[in-house]
Image (tube, rainbow, N blue to C red):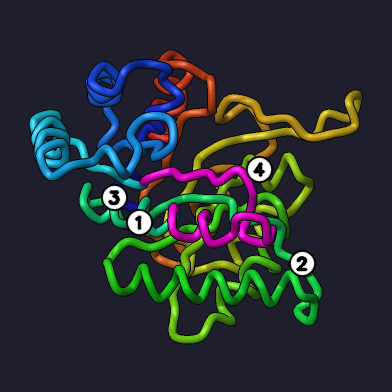
């Protein structure tokens, strides 16, 4: 497999934006993920700000791998749905302006029953956002974890005249007791970005917990091999929320050594 394109989730570094960019470069990353809620909001991204950020990134030889826009509720919840859709589209415009191909969000729990009202609502919203992404050139990436990879794949692959990719998060799949291998096989070429996190099932607590990359149950050598079957050449975004710079450095080293 070619050298991995490793990106750092800036919010995980717990640093101001400029210092976070310098830290990401220092860690040896080739890209960064920017949070469109906590670090830089779409409404604040003027043309001047865009030029300044892109110049800073170029000087550090970095690219924006993705924009994270975590809505407080999924698109399966009717309350304030129109507002969430419009906010997501604003984040997609921001991603395009920064040269990022994907906006990552957990879209809500995808039901197994394709005849349920929730399924139909999610399908309608995904087709709207999928067509919008094709129009502007930045796509929504639905993060795995709240449902099996097979259920998410069934939704994504059933969209008409629209494209939504998947953000494969092995850690969240493990935490929620879903198969990572099955998710990779089901989502296949629709995987647009990999959120490189890890997790374990804590039997004592009776639930899954997230852990630093390489210390959990996600078998990354196996995952990389499975992704190579689909010629995956996208980004691997490291940085556990709240993990800090030292943990991000260990994650970059772990993936680099693989």
Disc 2: which residue? 111
Looking at marks 3 and 4 on the same chain, the residue that comes earlier in the sequence is marked by 3
Query: Residue 155's image quarter?
Result: bottom right
Number of numbered discs overlaid on the protein picture? 4
Task: Point out the residue furthest to the bottom here.
Answer: 160
In front of the other: 188 or 49: 49
Query: Residue 133's image quarter?
Result: bottom left
Q: Which residues are magenta?
A: 67-87
Disc 3: which residue? 94
Disc 1: which residue? 92
Q: Quick one: label 3, few (<14), some, or many (20+) residues within 10 Å?
A: many
Residue drawn where x is 22% and y is 47% of the image: 98
Dots 4 and 2: beta carbons under 8 Å?
Answer: no
Looking at marks 4 and 1 on the same chain, the residue that comes earlier in the sequence is marked by 1
In front of the other: 173 or 47: 47
Q: Quick one: label 2, few (<14), some, or many (20+) residues within 10 Å?
A: many
Disc 4: which residue? 172
Looking at marks 1 and 2 on the same chain, the residue that comes earlier in the sequence is marked by 1
Is 134 on the left or on the right of 206, as rendered? left
Is 45 on the left or on the right of 161, as rendered? left
**Separation of disc 1 and disc 2 at Cα?**
25 Å
**Separation of disc 2 and disc 3 at Cα?**
30 Å
Residue drawn where x is 50% and y is 76% of the image: 127
In front of the other: 78 or 143: 78
Dots 1 and 3: beta carbons under 8 Å?
Answer: yes
**Separation of disc 4 and disc 1 at Cα?**
23 Å
Residue 53 vs 228, above or below: the answer is: above
Residue drawn where x is 68% and y is 77% of the image: 120
Q: Whole-percent x and y of residue 226?
A: 53, 59
**Separation of disc 3 and disc 4 at Cα?**
26 Å
Looking at marks 4 and 2 on the same chain, the residue that comes earlier in the sequence is marked by 2
């Amino acid at each position: 497999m070619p050298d991995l394109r490793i990106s750092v989730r800036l919010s995980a570094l717990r640093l101001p934006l400029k210092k976070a960019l310098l830290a990401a470069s220092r860690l040896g990353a080739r890209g960064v993920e920017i949070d469109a809620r906590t670090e830089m909001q779409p409404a604040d991204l003027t043309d001047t700000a865009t030029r300044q950020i892109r110049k800073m990134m170029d000087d550090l030889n970095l690219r924006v791998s993705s924009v994270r826009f975590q809505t407080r509720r999924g698109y399966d919840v009717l309350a304030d749905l129109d507002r969430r859709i419009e906010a997501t589209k604003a984040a997609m415009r921001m991603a395009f302006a920064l040269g990022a191909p994907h906006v990552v969000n957990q879209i809500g729990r995808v039901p197994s029953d394709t005849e349920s009202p929730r399924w139909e609502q999610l399908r309608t919203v995904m087709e709207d956002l999928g067509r919008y992404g094709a129009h502007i050139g930045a796509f929504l990436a639905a993060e795995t974890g709240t449902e099996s990879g097979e259920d998410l794949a069934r939704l994504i692959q059933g969209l008409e005249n629209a494209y939504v990719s998947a953000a494969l998060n092995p850690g969240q799949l493990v935490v929620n007791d879903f198969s990572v291998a099955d998710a990779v096989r089901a989502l296949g070429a629709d995987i647009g970005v990999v959120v490189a996190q890890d997790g374990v099932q804590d039997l004592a607590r009776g639930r899954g917990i997230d852990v630093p990359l390489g210390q959990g149950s996600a078998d990354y050598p196996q995952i990389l091999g499975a992704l190579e079957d689909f010629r995956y050449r996208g980004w691997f975004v490291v940085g556990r929320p709240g993990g800090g710079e030292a943990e991000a450095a260990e994650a970059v080293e772990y993936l680099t050594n693989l």
